[in-house]
Amino acid sequence: MLKTVFLGSMLWLLPLFSQAAGLALTLPQTLDWQPSPDTEQHISTVPLANRTVPLAGQLFAGQDRQFKLLVAPDGMDNLALDSPGKQFNHYVITNWAYIDVLNWFAGSADNTVNIPAANWVATAHRNGVKVIGSVFLAPTAWGGNASTVQQLVQQDAQGRFPVADKLVAMAQHYGFDGWLINQETSVSALPAAEARALSEKMQAFMQYLLSIRPDTMEIHWYDAMLSSGEVRWQNQLNSKLAEMIMPQGQLFADAIFLNYFWRGAEPGQSQQYALTQGIDPYAIYTGADLWPGRRDQAAFSNQHWLKALFDTDGSKAYTSLALFGNNFNFSFNGDQQTPAFSTFARDSSDVQSFYRAEQRLFSGDNMNKARLAVAGEWPGLAQFMPARTVVTQLPFTTHFNTGHGQRYARAGVLEHCDWHDIRQQDILPSWQFAVHGNPTVQLQYDFSQPYQGGSSLAISADLRQGTADIPLYLTGLTLASDSSLTIVAQQSGVAVLQLWLELDGKKQFFPLPVSEHWQQQQFSLAEFAGRQLSRIGITLAAADQRQYQARLGAIRVE
């Protein structure tokens, strides 16, 4: 049944092209900070969405549902600068369904306290992803000094830590979820007794911060400073690190971010030590530095470090994982050993290389989340961890808008302008992308013909190579008596495209017509009232057509 309906959402009432960078403060500025109208542009009011990790509907059985992933793009202060938003080629993240925490990794020797940008917090929160800021005390080689550490841990006459109080107040005011305390300044140049005393004061600061933060806030500690005051990265949880992070036998943070200088057995050793100390191993994030040329975990250089995080059959993780420098697809310019993964930061025409590099990180060298890797291939994170979903309440709408574009569309009407606003990113497919069957099927975000926002989902295939089944969204919806499905799509040549809803484990198919232009259809779902919708996907039938093309512009279930 064909019917015209409005597929917009409240996001489209936001001022187009609004952008706000994160804040970076010195410690004196932090102590002087007070909420004011001048800071309103930096506030996110979007609550953290509820997300689930359902057993049903996953691509693979038996994956570790307790395993967590933190991502820390290097230099978020440079990736989200203030701008008029009239530039397409800014950084975005799209594989939110596999991410649990975004660390706003930033800072310098002067700018110690780094507050996430509100537009990124809003987008992460709509995907159920927590966002934590960074308190960065730089290595001495980068200008760090003991006086900054002393400023951080100064106490007032009542024994309180004013900086800790400000950190909690800032996170609550700006609407984000906690802090990484990244203390990499060695104070070992001080007399040994002073260095140890300062280390003990840091422990007291962390205990105080943990005690005053609300239950919804997370405090993470970076593996660097030891109880002697020197900085020696341990790269695993062991007795030396425990002496620092467990004063009086109690962990002084909610989570520990381990450094990257490891090669094999350390994750398993961290797990074993955590269990002896009564620490949840999943609160330990083993670090992996993806930046090419720096560490053994450099992007796609080998798969051994990823497999070392899991037991022999890959079904159980030893610890959680923190990916550092996952913005290599945008910021890495190439070197003598490794060419750039994309030039999108300088050349907007290279956008597909930018997207493919992130998809490869999660999907593997075969670029298909539905296929297991063969020996020697980078397997992708999705082979080891299940997808999460926030699609648990009606209505659900997506236009496959990634939050930027070379033109802006409103119900198929195009405006010719580059733009970028991460806040307007839709909930994107859980699986980017997973194809069962026809090996020629390609899916990508199409910036040439968006329906709403900046992108649609393009599908191409040689239909002579067989049928294809393509799951897109993992969901947890219950249909109502007045529920309906609306689809906006276009396809050329032959009518082989169907959208399906998986209801109580059985797929219901909704065929789509041939149309060179955007065609909108609505289907009643009343007969399925009370049924559980666990996945949304599409299928392609086989046909005698070599260059098939289609696009999805919108899906709405209400």
Image: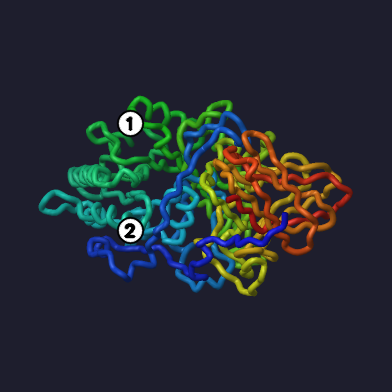
| Label 1 crowd (10 A; few <14 / some 14-19 / many >=20) | few
Q: Residue at x 81, y 58 (%)?
A: 492
Q: Which residue is mark 1?
A: 239
Left or right of 201 in this view: 554: right
Where does residue 298 sit, x and y in percent of width and height?
55, 46
Where does residue 374 sit, x and y in percent of width and height?
69, 35
Q: Mark 1: which amino acid?
A: Ser
Q: CA distance from mark 2 to mark 1?
A: 29 Å
Is residue 214 something one can see in this rendering? yes
Structure colour scheme: rainbow
Q: Nearer the viewer, residue 18 or 198?
A: 18
Q: Residue at x 30, y 49 (%)?
A: 186
Q: Nearer the viewer, residue 489 or 44?
A: 489
Left or right of 299 in this view: 176: left
Q: Nearer the viewer, mark 2 or mark 1?
A: 2
> Which image quadrant for residue 466?
top right
Q: Mark 2: which amino acid?
A: Val
| Label 2 crowd (10 A; few <14 / some 14-19 / many >=20) | many
Where does residue 428 sit, x and y in percent of width and height?
58, 52
Left or right of 235 in this view: 538: right
Ranked by sequence position, the earlier of labels 2 and 1 is 2
Is residue 192 something one can see in this rendering? no
Asked which secondary structure carries label 2, the reply is strand
Image quarter (top left, top right, bottom left or bottom right) of the N terminus: bottom right
> Which image quadrant for residue 354?
bottom right
Q: Nearer the viewer, residue 52 or 78?
A: 52
Checking the image for residue 113, the label placed there is 2
Q: Residue at x 50, y 46 (%)?
A: 99
Asked which secondary structure carries label 1, the reply is helix
Where does residue 257 sit, x and y in percent of width and height?
40, 43
